[in-house]
Amino acid sequence: MAPWSPRAFLRARPQDLGTEPDAERAVATRLVPTARELLVVPGSSGAAEVLGLVERLPVRGRTEVLCGPDAGPDLIAGLLERGFVVYDAAATLDHSVLVLDRRLGWRLPAWQPLSHAMSVAHRLLWTRIGQYSLQSGTVEAIHAENRLFSLRERPFWVNTAFRDLPLPAVGDEVRVVGLFSSLGGRLPMLHALRIDPAHAGAGVDEP
């Protein structure tokens, strides 16, 4: 009988494991289109890769994105336009996270599998402090003293002081990228991140 090769008992060297992230990425790419729920958390690293993955694949289920405080209005508007549900998170992670159906997930950019994906997802969702929205309509009234304006047939005020934006004029057709915060008073308030003419973007409103 031929003797066992000593190589069968050698621990893999780091360079031998170089394809593992590629394999994990391939699994995610295969499963994302069929997932019923996606949770995406862009962090300080890996954000471009995780967002690029979910943006280029046809996602059938609900996609929730948790954006940290440094997320800009262009990024937020683009995610909302794709039909994603976008939340304001309390902090930005130093890595990115992707979780499928609360049962399978990865930490990017290393594509390290999450051992307790459901627990991680629940902890991350508890960091939500508001939900972003796209709203468009006709300016109906202005409260200049408080830097507020209302849109016709909308049950909330738009706060322009949040990002020190100029007030539009009554009758203007506008499109607002804003935040409905979970914190604050009882009056429904959309805190505007950006205000554009309504023709500058899609006219479909997102909650």
Image (tube, grey):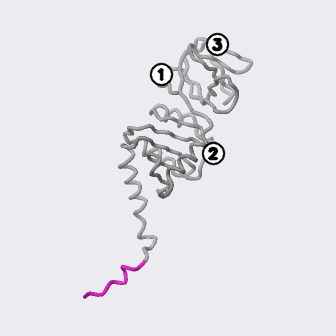
Element carrying mark 3: strand
> CA separation, marks 1 and 3?
20 Å
The residue stretch that appears in magenta: 1-10
Q: Which residue is mark 1?
A: 203
> CA separation, marks 2 and 3?
35 Å
Q: Residues within 10 Å of mark 3 (few under 14, many from 20)?
A: some
Residue 86 rendering spot, x and y as whole percentages? 53, 36
Q: Which residue is depicted at the point 54% across and 23% down?
A: 135
Element carrying mark 2: loop
Amino acid under disc 2:
Ala
> CA separation, marks 2 and 1?
30 Å
Please state the total of marks drawn on the protein image. Answer: 3
Q: Relative to residue 167, is residue 78 depicted above or below?
A: below
Q: Residues within 10 Å of mark 1 (few under 14, many from 20)?
A: some
Q: Earlier in the sequence, mark 2 or mark 3?
A: 2
Amino acid under disc 1:
Gly
Q: Earlier in the sequence, mark 2 or mark 1?
A: 2
Q: Which residue is depicted at the point 40% across and 58% down?
A: 22
Q: Which residue is mark 2?
A: 91
Q: Residues within 10 Å of mark 2 (few under 14, many from 20)?
A: some
**Nearer to us in this view, 101 or 157:** 101
Which residue is outermost to the right? 145
Q: Which residue is mark 3?
A: 141
Is 11 displayed left or right of 170 in the figure? left
Residue 90 rendering spot, x and y as whole percentages? 64, 42
Q: Earlier in the sequence, mark 1 or mark 3?
A: 3
| Quarter assignment of residue 33 | top left
Element carrying mark 1: loop
Q: Relative to residue 149, is residue 87 depicted above or below?
A: below
Residue 125 rendering spot, x and y as whole percentages? 56, 43
